[in-house]
Amino acid sequence: MTTTSPEPAERPLSSSSAGASRTTGRSRRADLQSDLVALPMHEDVPARVRELPLPGLALGEVVAALEARYDPALAEDWDAVGLVCGDPEEPVRSVLFAVDPTAAVVDEAIALGVDLLVTHHPLLLTPVHGVPASDPKGRLVHRLIRAGIGLFVAHTNADRAPDHGVNDALAAALGVGDVHPLESVAAPETDTLVVFVPVGVSDQLVDALSAAGAGVIGDYTRCVWQTTGTGTFIPGDETHPAIGRRGQVERVPEIRLEMVVPRACRAEVLRALLELHPYEDPGYAFFENSATASRAGLGRVGELTRPVTLREFAERVAATLPGTPCGVRVAGDPDRVVRTVAVCGGSGASMLAAAASAEADVFVTSDLKHHAASEATEHPGPALCDVAHFASEWPWLPVAADLLHRDLGARVQVAVSARPTDPWSWQVGADQVGGQLVGGYGDHARLRSAEEQAD
Ligand SMILES: [Zn+2]
């Protein structure tokens, strides 16, 4: 069945606050965007962001903040993420977020006078040997550099990123909560450090270990478990004990500290421990923790707060995401009850099996091909909502913009592009066919059927 959005391309994309008003996950979206600073969205608006009294930051610092949220290590091997052009030393006062680095978006960035354009899709995904201005992509690079605008890409790393990635944003926009990845990325390997330290030194040691990278659990830092007890030992003949005497049993009030340590930081943490610990030979051990799934990964699956029919859900999708000419294509019984929802922003056909394994009632993604969709509907599994690729990734823009604004202490202005970049700009012939052939093809089928009966 094919349906069209009641408001195709005419629906304006404006600043991110427009997205909040349309979403059924209203409170969360509104909260996410509450302090988003929207820039003027049209060239005829006289205010220019360069004139705003913002101190700005070096581009390198802005890139570091973006990469702290959208770790390049999460990107696919084939991907091309990070800074495409721009001088890390140059100041950035304003940033524009868009899905695609198209000519129209570059026009917009120049008109707004921003210093940095952040896009989800790479401009240069395939390797190039040059960027001559005679090439369409090279021309965009030239225009950006001439205008003093950097270009930064967060693509599959933004897809996989935990909490504030493309898929979290899509799920939140559709009112899907309690989400986890359809395909998790393993969490970074960690150890647990256990060290025994005299009571008076423990706080200093915890500070030093924390500074070296220990004790981070989620957004919490300096996490440590402490138990007090008595340490006993006999210093040997060749020792130089900080406490006690050679050959005599010593009893010292000690604290047992336990801290989680990223394995990548083990050497640095040990260096800090040995530097600060007063004992000649401190008692410590690193215990390797078992692997755990992280909140990062592709796709998301979660629950609606109350079940709805597939028809209601599809209407919610159409009303929440930016309107596009092709609207939302749905496969499945309109009266099917939907509670568990899987999403994958962009081309998510590879996540179909994972959505089925997660027992999703519906899977929202883009670019599903005929055979994959056809086979999926022939087997038990989720109903399908196929939306415009651009529309599925757009909800990430206000989330990322707001996050950067907050991460940088409001020292840069942020805005979301007002230019829809869905390449499909119009369509004809969409109809509510309800599973029957229509028009001449329907007549033809009936005629053939009659002929066959005559035979
Ligand atoms: Zn995409």
Image: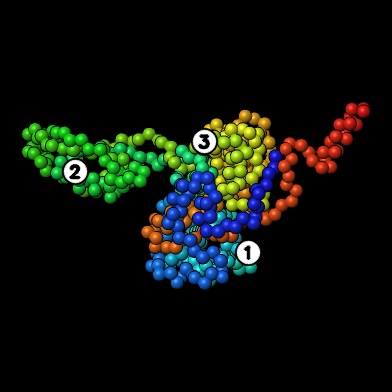
Q: Amino acid at mark 2?
A: Ser
Residue 251 image position (x, y, % from top left): 10, 34
Q: Residue at x 61, y 43 (%)?
A: 315
| Ligand 1 within 8 Å of the CB at mark 3 | no
Whether tag 2 and tag 3 are in contact, CB under 8 A, the answer is no
Say what secondary structure mark 3 lies in: strand
Residue 220 image position (x, y, % from top left): 32, 45
| Label 2 – label 3 distance at C-alpha | 50 Å
Residue on which disc 2 sits? 202
Q: Residue at x 40, y 67 (%)?
A: 54
Residue 440 image position (x, y, % from top left): 84, 42
* Circle nearer the N terminus (3, 1): 1
The image's colouring method is rainbow
Residue on which disc 1 sits? 136
Q: Nearer the viewer, residue 250 or 451?
A: 451
Q: Nearer the viewer, mark 2 or mark 3?
A: 3
| Ligand 1 within 8 Å of the CB at mark 2 | no
| Label 3 – label 1 distance at C-alpha | 48 Å
Query: Is residue 348 shown to the viewer in this render?
Result: no
Q: Nearer the viewer, residue 455 or 8?
A: 8
Say what secondary structure mark 2 lies in: helix
Say what secondary structure mark 1 lies in: helix
Residue 2 lies, with reference to residue 101, above or below; the image says: above
